[in-house]
Image (cartoon, coloured by chain):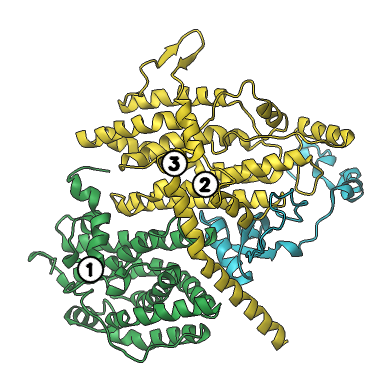
Amino acid sequence: MSSVNPGALPQSDEAQPKKRNEWPLWEVFIRGQHGMSHRHVGSLHAPDADMAIRNARDVYTRRNEGVSIWVVEARHIAASSPSDKGPLYEPSESKVYRHPTFYDIPDEAGHM
Amino acid sequence: MYAQMIQSEATAEDPDKLAAFEARIAAGEKIEPKDWMPAGYRKTLIRQIGQHAHSEIVGQLPEGNWITRAPTLERKAILLAKVQDEAGHGLYLYCAAETLGVSRDELTEMLLDGRMKYSSIFNYPTLTWADMGAVGWLVDGAAIMNQVPLQRTSYGPYSRAMIRICKEESFHQRQGYDIMMKMAFGTPAQKRMAQDALNRFWYPALMMFGPSDKESVHSAQSMAWKIKMNTNDELRQKFVDETVPQAEYLGLTVPDPDLKWNEERGHYDFSEPDWSEFFDVLKGNGPCNADRMEARQQAWAEGQWVRDGLMAHARKRAARRVAAE
Amino acid sequence: MTAPAACPDPALFEFCLRMGDNTLVLGHRVSEWCGHAPVIEEDIALANTALDLIGQTQLWLGLAGEVEGAGRSADDLAFLRDAWDFRNLLLVERPNRDFGHTLLRQCLFDAWHLEMLTALCGSSEPRVSEISQKAVKEVSYHLERSADTVIGLGDGTPESHARMQDALDRLWPYVGEAFLPDAIDAEVAARGIAPDPASLRAGFDARIGAILAEATLSLPDSRFAHQGGKTGVRHTEDLGHMLATMQFLQRAYPGATW
């Protein structure tokens, strides 16, 4: 449901597509419980930010999923490109000491 | 199963990129919007997700037909919540399709001018309250057969939409069966309605899986790309095997004289639906094709001034804010 | 009067019917939009509003049945009374017409409903207060949403503005009924169950005035008010058609359970 930077339009059957007055696309982030971070849950269309928040409440919290909503217009999101995948993420892969399972803690020490 | 007869297309691609792409899919990796993908993969997905989304939206109509006649306040609320979920599912799917570079309005126009299709099942009328039961039980039941495996589909946004949809849909089939139980165990008139609904929806539900695709090239391509997870026949058999005992529990008769348990196969043998009827419905000659399309065209046309009005107001507000700064 | 002679508290019964019939009839009207709204997001939002109103109906009519003490359930009251026994405001039974008309009707009702429920939270009747405390949260959101839509469409394009002004001119004569007290209102007010309806007018006028000003819509001069809904004396022709649809199954198959 992420709508970040869609790829090129597939070839359209129409040579000259009609001009549309489409509502902008918004990405919706919801914090489900107090203390958790906002998480991307999906997208929707709305004329402006206020309506996007209301639409998000109606669309994405129908089952009491959220306590806090963020919306951001999809075109304002900057995303890493797939070719960055190596340089951006690989260095952290070697820093295994950031992960708790890196450490062997004897059972006698108790839960940690 | 809301995607029927989706044509996949193989396109001429850089063989190295294609091989890397197919290796990723084979390894169970998800393809994300900005990743390289063959044009055919993109086009096939747009067709399939678009058709699925259209089916959810058109699918609001046959059940919406009974919201104002629901027999109790609770039934009215349940049905409304269910049809509302379908609108939500349409929305999630359109958003998934939008990540492939086609806008929702563009997809909508393609539905309304007939370039894109929706599932054949929604071209059948809902004539009695028991149809609300039959649609939930059989139509949602058939849809779930297809949607559960699609949670593992290779395209990330589609997979995530399907996960959310499956989670929300869990009550849909059950509420349908619950209605069927009330009807089948109710007054003689209610039982008659229940049997009549099963009679009318059985074969259209079997058609939802599409004709046999064992030999289909398109299916093989889509399955290799993990856009399609099972063959139509596999899913249809699974549906029949699960549904027949449910009908027996209700004391209803499946309208197929040749239906019988095949000990050797470990499956039910059953009659094929009338495929000429299926192709007629696809061509626009189902009982409700014209009405369904007209309802959607009308909603879209009559909504234009609303969409334009709210957009114009948003622009004015933004301009006023800039002017005030 | 629908309450049988034996009803221990006819005024409270009647008051609950008025609240519950408003939400029943409006919830029904809003649900008629399902599958036909201008955009999917609005379709979903309208369904949420209708679902809230149906839920409130179950509570109000449930309480009405309890007060009446004749064994009638919320469903019995909703599906087995004829139009003259309905106690809703005429405003809510008016047909949907277009989306703008529907949302303006919603906004006018929400603004009254919010004033009313806010006052009812302090009702001397604990069951009334309890229902209101749940409903007032839902209705605050209904008003937020309907007001914003009215503002957006009023201050949108020339076409949307014209349609909203037309809707306001058509609906305004149905607004006044909500604020005109009768004997039932006087009794429940005297007992501290509900406010005097007239006392809600100033708050309503302030809210609606601000919304309409931002929507660039002009309030009609006339304060003429059609009446007959909440007393049941003279409903509009539309209610009977709505009930014919809504009550069809219960009427055609009496005694069946669904």
**Chain given the colour cyan:** A
Q: Work out whether mark 2 precedes mark 3 in sequence or the reverse, and give the earlier one.
A: 2
**Chain given the colour yellow:** B
Point 51% across, 11% down: residue: B265
Q: In which quarter of the image is the N terminus of chain C?
A: bottom left
| Helix, strand or loop for disc 3 | helix
Q: Residue B274, how many percent across, how many down? A: 44, 25
Colour of chain C, in one word, is green
Q: Is residue B272 above or below residue C195?
A: above
The answer to whether B47 appears left or right of B14 in the picture is left
Picture disc at residue C237: 1
Pick whichever, C168 or C138, lies toward us. Answer: C168
- The residue carrying mark 2 is B56
Using a 10 Å C-alpha cutoff, classify the residue at mark 3 as few (fewer than 14 neighbours), some (14 to 19) or many (20 or more).
many
Q: Residue C222, how many percent across, how many down? A: 32, 90
The answer to whether B8 appears left or right of C141 in the picture is right
Using a 10 Å C-alpha cutoff, classify the residue at mark 2 as few (fewer than 14 neighbours), some (14 to 19) or many (20 or more).
many
Q: Residue A77, how many percent across, how many down? A: 76, 61
Q: Which quadrant of the view contains residue C240?
A: bottom left
- The residue carrying mark 3 is B123
